[in-house]
Image (cartoon, coloured by chain):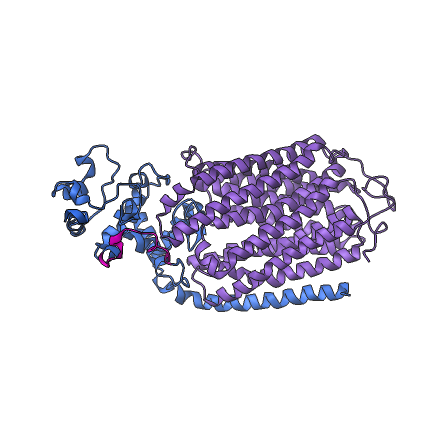
Amino acid sequence: MKYESQRVAWYFFATCMLLFSLQIVYGFIMGFAHAGHDVLHEWIPFHTARATHTNLLVMWLLAGFMGAAYFIVPEEADRELYWPKLAYVQWAALVIVGVTAVIGFHFGWWEGRKFLEIPRPLDYLVVVDVLAFVINIGMTIWKGRRVTTTSSVLFFGLLMAAVLYLPGMIPTDNQTMDSYWRWWVVHLWVEGVWELIMGGILSYLLIKLTGMDREIVEKWLYVIVGLTFLSGILGTGHHYYFIGTPRYWLMIGGIFSALEPLAFLGMAMYAITIARRGGRQHPNRTALAWTVGCGVISFVGAGFLGFAHTIPQVNLYTHGTLVTAMHGHMAFWGAYAMLVLAIIAYATPALTGRRLHDRPAATFAFWTSNIGMIAMTLALAVAGVTQVVLERRVGMEFLDVQREIEMHFWGLIMAAALFTLGIGAYIWNFVQHGWPKGELEGGEGQPRQEIAKQPASDDAAAVPAE
Amino acid sequence: MLSKSAARAFFVGGTALCSLAFIGLTVDTIGRIPAQTHEENLTPAVIRGKNLWDESNCMGCHTLLGEGAYYAPELTRVYERRGPEFIAAMLRDPAAMYPGARRMEQYDFTDEEIADLVAFLAWVNEMDLNGFPAPPTLASAAAPSASSTSPVASGAGRPRVFEQMCVACHAIDGRGGSVGPALDGVADRVEPDFFERWLRDPAAVRPGTAMPRLPLSDAQLAELVAFLSQQHTEGAE
């Protein structure tokens, strides 16, 4: 850590840990309900648990992105945040809006639109809050000593994420139009601009962790985010197959969705190649594991499973079944949850000044949570495919099919228990690091926050690739 | 070897091109949606129904147009599948319709609100969805009963109300729900006048039964009684 104002990132990361824990609790409520034990029905009916589970995910990922930006951008721009105090106010506002929304869900204060359940008055507060964040980051880059590709890509991603929140607020009475605009937000976020944020954060982590030449890392960053948009924008079409939109979307969505794995494959190869070729052995191996893992699991979850599910002929039968939940879990985990956990694993030792990243708990967290998530995905896959065959192909009644697949949800619950164990270890490691009281390392021209043995800053220590 | 500026040009150019194409297609789609979704039938009742759909977060358990959660049935074609009476009865008292099964929230809708929701589902039912939901292509293979090969048993001879309401819980010829007993040969097992008494008020015949009192008109009742009275097993005929 080089700048005082980077400390604010820790508060965002701590918020992530808290919201993530809560998200898992609500996941268990839904898992047990699916397994036939909807014991909390009177207090937390399924749709409340569902809205809370997905919105907590969105909130903690956004908090993670914001924390990451507050940590990364000062170093990339070589200056303090433009308005350090505004960052703390913006953090507090985010927490207040988030907590209000989650409590509101338990009293039926919501919009009932998947992933965008937050009620309208809070939507406006979200927009104001995100604007404050984006302007602060933008000013920091603008007034900084240097403008790097990494920080520009990150900023452009964050800005577009804020702008693309707006189509979800267009009023309409037609359910089809409602869905149409909702996917402008949800799809263009997760398979569009969030991947810019992902690319920016990954590129920062790879430069720092491997010492690879910045020029090379950033050149390939352009190629990957280029591929993302080339496939992802028109790939939105895979949400427009069967909702009352023209038939041509079947072809457009099918073709461009088939290209989407390329972007994720690029992301995975980018992370693996750079990690192997980079010369520097940064001691924080845990952060590197999360970084490379993010590239690999996002390819499997978002790229491969997404591809299998969005072929129009397949989607005709899998649309609106648990197959979507199967793909969704691993995609969000690989692409975004692991990304945020990677930057937290990297930043926490620097922020707190306590280097506990090599503790057994940190390694245990990485492997256990990943094995747990893969097992969860498999359980949902079996449940989903069985549902598709029995309900969509054979024509059995919905509830009869659900009884048939109840046992797979016990499998899901066991896998989720393993996952929770891993995340518990991660959070324990985070808590052990303590408060963000790390000392600022080095002054101008001095070694940066890297370990003292490192000869110099990231660019000077760069190892050419060829 | 690719230079950084070429990589940047690829990113900026590709993104601009795809964004423009996407915006163009969006404009075209918005022009076509009114016809494809029969927007002319968006009555005030349908719009009130849509608002209720959102406020109640129905998507938190059900899917509509295949979108939502996967805890409760797909409702895109529910109007055709179950009919307005069944939907209204379900919304009035979900626990009574599927006793002991997965629970739906008791909403306490007014009669007018229920009518609005039914109107909304009727409107959705008419949309052109490019072939979704697909008919279950393996359905005939999975009903091995010999009688299911005859045209009558494939549903053609059954009253519409039977296909909409009764099969939600009861199976016949190996198809239908498993909440209540299968109805094959049911006429052999009960007195001839049983069906009418039973359908008018199940609880009066057997106190504590899980069978709900269905909202049937006299014509529908007569149709069902006639149909059920013919359900003899083949050997007994």
Q: Is residue A375 left or right of residue A1?
A: left
Magenta-drawn segment: B135-152
Compared to A23, does A304 lie above or below?
Answer: below
- Foreground pick, B134 / B42: B134
**Percent x, y for residue A228?**
63, 59
- Name the magenta segment's main secondary structure: loop
Q: Is residue B46 left or right of residue B148?
A: right
Q: Quadrant of the C terminus of chain A?
A: bottom right
Say whether residue A236 is visible.
yes
Instruction: Answer with the quarter of the image where residue B187 lies.
Output: top left
Say whether residue A319 is visible.
no
**Percent x, y for residue A309?**
51, 55
Q: Is residue A292 left or right of residue B158?
A: right
Examine the structure image and report whether residue A307 is included in the region drawn in magenta: no
Which chain is assigned purple?
A
Q: Is residue A211 left or right of residue B141?
A: right
**Percent x, y for residue A287?**
72, 42
Residue in view at x 46 percent, y 68 percent: B31
Q: Give the residue at the far front of this rendering.
A: B235
Chain B as rendered: colour: blue
Residue in view at x 29 percent, y 39 percent: B96
- Foreground pick, A112 / B45: A112
Examine the structure image and report whether residue B139 is included in the region drawn in magenta: yes
Compared to B143, does A47 lie above or below?
Answer: above
Compared to A24, does B235 lie above or below?
Answer: below
Compared to B125, does A248 lie above or below?
Answer: below
For the image shown, how many numbered marks are present on the structure?
0
- Foreground pick, A77 / B145: B145
- Foreground pick, A274 / A156: A274
